[in-house]
Amino acid sequence: MVPPPPVNKPHVCLSTVLIMSSLVLMDAYLVEQNQGSRKLGICIMVSVGDVCFLLVLRYMAVWVGAEVRTAKRGYAMILWFLYVFVLEIKVYFVYQNYKADRKSLDLLARKALTLLLSVCIPALYVLLVATEHMDYVRTFKKKEDLRNRLFWVVIDMLDVLDIQANLWEPQKKGLPLWAEGLMFFYCYILLLTLPCVSLCEISMQGFSIVPHRMMLYPMLSLLTVNIATLFIRGSNMVFFRDARVSGIFMGKNVLAIVLKLCMFVQYRKQLRHGPAGFSTAPQPQPALQLLKSQNQTPGPEALGRENT
């Protein structure tokens, strides 16, 4: 299957470098956490896995680069799902190794792991959306409104990664085993699905994209990120006396709940006023119809009425 031209080669190269560099760095964590012959076996295993993933990425990145200037993001959703699926599996094994070796004092390496995920995952999402290549979005206001929507997606991903990072950053014993597993896989599912929902919403809008009508992602993120993570952090703080809870992200979620509720109320008011409620400016007459109306000559009956 050959993707339709033209292909954005800088986009293909940048996405490939970003994906493979993050996976190789995760492999370095896995290799360094093992010793002896086991270290060699892990090195061979992750190398073979990276080669197989690179073979798939060779075609996926080209297909994504071919649809960058279009209104479709289907291949971008597939690539995102594959990348996060593979990356989070490696993160899980790194997390389990850190959990088994709590006496290790490599706090800097744990913080670096959090920084790596916080940079690579949101950066790939922004790269896959590629608002700078949306030439069909011609007005500056509409493009900035779209960027503001995408910024909320990035903030939600950082919120989810902050919860996940609490599992491997501290050295002392933290949450119960069932709570840690539930938190990790809940964050795993959110990172897999929510950015795909955002990409799907952009793709469904097509060339006539209207950012303020994209309400699917705000509704899902309100329930699964803002309310759910606020409940998770509150439960960890009250029931498990977890002092690592981020008060900044709790405040962010409270503000996000208020802002999104206000946005939903305003959206319902606009729906009651019909399509005119979304735009108060008069619709311009199409140029072709305007030229026809200007060049139209009156018929015989109209000339007869004018003469009488």
Image (cartoon, grey):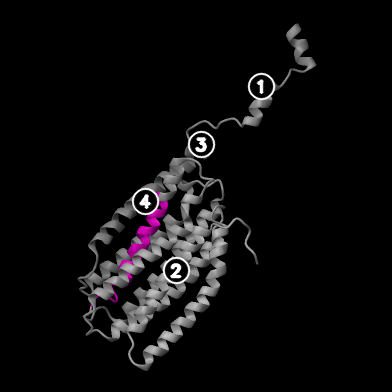
Q: Secondary structure at mark 4?
A: helix
- Position of the N terminus by quadrant: bottom right
Residue 228 seen anywhere in this rendered image of the structure: no
Query: Is residue 65 a member of the stretch shown in magenta?
Result: no
Which residue in the protein does label 4 denote?
261
Q: Indicate which disc, 1 or 4, sits on the residue closer to the N terminus.
A: 4
Around disc 4, counting alpha carbons within 10 Å, would you say few (fewer than 14), some (14 to 19), or many (20 or more)? Answer: some
Percent coordinates x, y for residue 301 in the rendering: 78, 15
Query: Is residue 167 a member of the stretch shown in magenta?
Result: yes
* CA gap, disc 2 and disc 4: 36 Å
Magenta stretch: dominant secondary structure: helix
Which residue in the protein does label 2 denote?
19
Three-letter amino acid code at the position of disc 3: Ala
Q: Are marks 4 and 3 in contact (CB under 8 Å)?
A: no
Residue 303 is left or right of residue 138, and the answer is right
Q: How many marks?
A: 4
* Viewer-side residue, 75 vs 199: 75
Around disc 3, counting alpha carbons within 10 Å, would you say few (fewer than 14), some (14 to 19), or many (20 or more)? Answer: few
Three-letter amino acid code at the position of disc 2: Ile
Three-letter amino acid code at the position of disc 4: Leu
Which residue in the protein does label 3 denote?
276
* CA gap, disc 1 and disc 3: 27 Å
Question: Range of the magenta residues?
Answer: 148-170
Q: Secondary structure at mark 1?
A: helix
Q: Secondary structure at mark 2?
A: helix
Q: Indicate which disc, 1 or 2, sits on the residue closer to the N terminus.
A: 2
Question: Which numbered disc covers residue 294?
Answer: 1
Q: Is 87 placed above or below 131 here?
A: below
Residue at 33%, 54% in the rendered image: 256
Q: Indicate which disc, 3 or 2, sits on the residue closer to the N terminus.
A: 2
Percent coordinates x, y for residue 50 in the rendering: 47, 77
